[in-house]
Amino acid sequence: MGAGLRVDTVRVNAAAVKKRIANWGNYPVVEAEVARLETEERLAGLLSRPMIARGMGRCYGDASLGERVLSTLPHDRFLSFDEGTGDLECQAGTVLGTIVETFVPRGWFLPVTPGTRFVTVGGAISADVHGKNHHIDGSFCRHVRSLRVMTADGGIVNCSQNENAELFDTVCGGMGLAGIILSAVIRLKKVETPYVRQETVKAKDLGEVMDLFERSADWPYSVAWIDCLSGSGRALMIRGAHATREEALGLPVSGAKTPSLNVPFFLPSFALNGVSVKLFNALYYAKARRGVTTAITGYESFFYPLDGVQNWNRIYGRRGFVQYQLVLPKEQSRAGIAAVLKRVADAGQGSFLAVLKLLGKGEHLLSFPMEGYTLALDFPITKNLFGLLDELDAIVLRHGGRLYLAKDARMNAGTFNKGYANADAFRARKAKFDPRGVFQSLQSKRLHI
């Protein structure tokens, strides 16, 4: 979260302190009792009252916020690595960026990575995060070999697809509501270099960029930036594949580093508006050359472009912002996303970041993906925003879609129930594994999970 929202902490007891905290959207800001996961033995004694685990706080809304929060960040050690299989065992507080910095020089990369490396392994599993390769490689949990989980009674359970499979399936994508992940074994993927062969293709409208996605389905990675205020949905599609040694010949073995910038303070709320965003979008689209542009780029700039700007969430001002991420089934995607973009353009509510990706099927009860397209939009919080988002919810549901729990800060329980067909099945599983309701967040209470 932005440093401007931190205040002095007040110690509650030997295990916890009071803090005002927020996640990456800087909304909502809450006062929480924050404990640290320093030893597993000590953790069991903290389960007498409701709590939720929290890693880097890079979910955007309130999924890892509550009256009591458990920080997993101290629990961040590598435990073992198998060079033959690529199986890495690590504690839940291990940050994805630490994994790539350690293992890319050894020829290994994450099988799936979200758009930021500042996410813990526990958070990636709890949200079943996806990346630019979901249409081929699925979500993060597909590559999790096993977990060690502390359940609500303080017991520690080993689980996988073959052992205690029901708990495994509930924890994967379960938003931290079925247990506390202590450690995981994930299978890394072999890569030859720290570089990516990237192609950028200009598309004149939404239909053309979706056609590009379909024709690019054999590319391992694909994503598009959409100009959501243009009316047409003009776009830049970026597709990529890990570069071979031959393709990266002559480049530094260590890889290219992304320059680090910083937003040192919150920008005034008027800095981002329909006019400024429209101007930025027009310039960004215009600077791209026609046809196909090819480049060899470092993995950091391809997978984590925004990580090069520290505290970029401050550009939305002190009131914060909401990332609205939806997914629609493929047969409804063109009409549904066009309707969403039209409503956003009509409202003049500029989204500085608008990202489109092709997804495959989801694999767990609360997994976000479905076979279709996902669109993510960032909106600064204004007095009219939440009414607009309610309208977008109706469009999403009308087209058979749902919203991403890891980005959500304001969806109501009705929208959640309609979008997630397995909502009641998850509630039944949670009641089985957590009958006292130990694991709960502001989001879970809002959505009655």
Image (cartoon, rainbow, N blue to C red):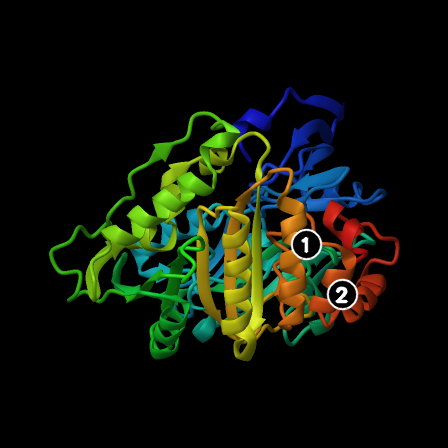
Query: The residue under label 1 is which amino acid type?
Result: Asp
Q: Residue furthest left?
A: 250
Q: Residue at x 39, y 63 (%)?
A: 223
The one of 346 and 162 positioned closer to us in this rendering:
346
Q: Earlier in the sequence, mark 1 or mark 2?
A: 1
The one of 49 and 131 positioned closer to us in this rendering:
131
Count of numbered labels shown in the rendering: 2
The one of 207 and 143 positioned closer to us in this rendering:
207
Q: Quadrant of the N terminus?
A: top right
Q: Quadrant of residue 380?
A: top right
Q: Residue furthest front?
A: 346
Real-space Cα separation, disc 1 to disc 2, in angstroms:
15 Å
**Circle 1 residue:** 390
Rendered location of residue 76, percent (x, y): 54, 45
The one of 36 and 127 positioned closer to us in this rendering:
127
Rendered location of residue 425, percent (x, y): 78, 71
**410, above or below 201, in the image:** above
Rendered location of residue 85, percent (x, y): 42, 70
174 with respect to 48 (left or right): left
Rendered location of residue 423, percent (x, y): 76, 67
Q: Quadrant of the C terminus?
A: bottom right
Residue 320 in view: yes
Q: Residue at x 47, y 38 (%)?
A: 273
**251, above or below 418, in the image:** above
1 or 2: mark nearer the eye: 1
Q: Residues within 10 Å of mark 1 (few under 14, many from 20)?
A: some
416 with respect to 112 (left or right): right
**Circle 2 residue:** 417
Q: Residue at x 17, y 65 (%)?
A: 247
Question: SS at mark 2?
Answer: helix
Query: The residue under label 2 is which amino acid type?
Result: Asn
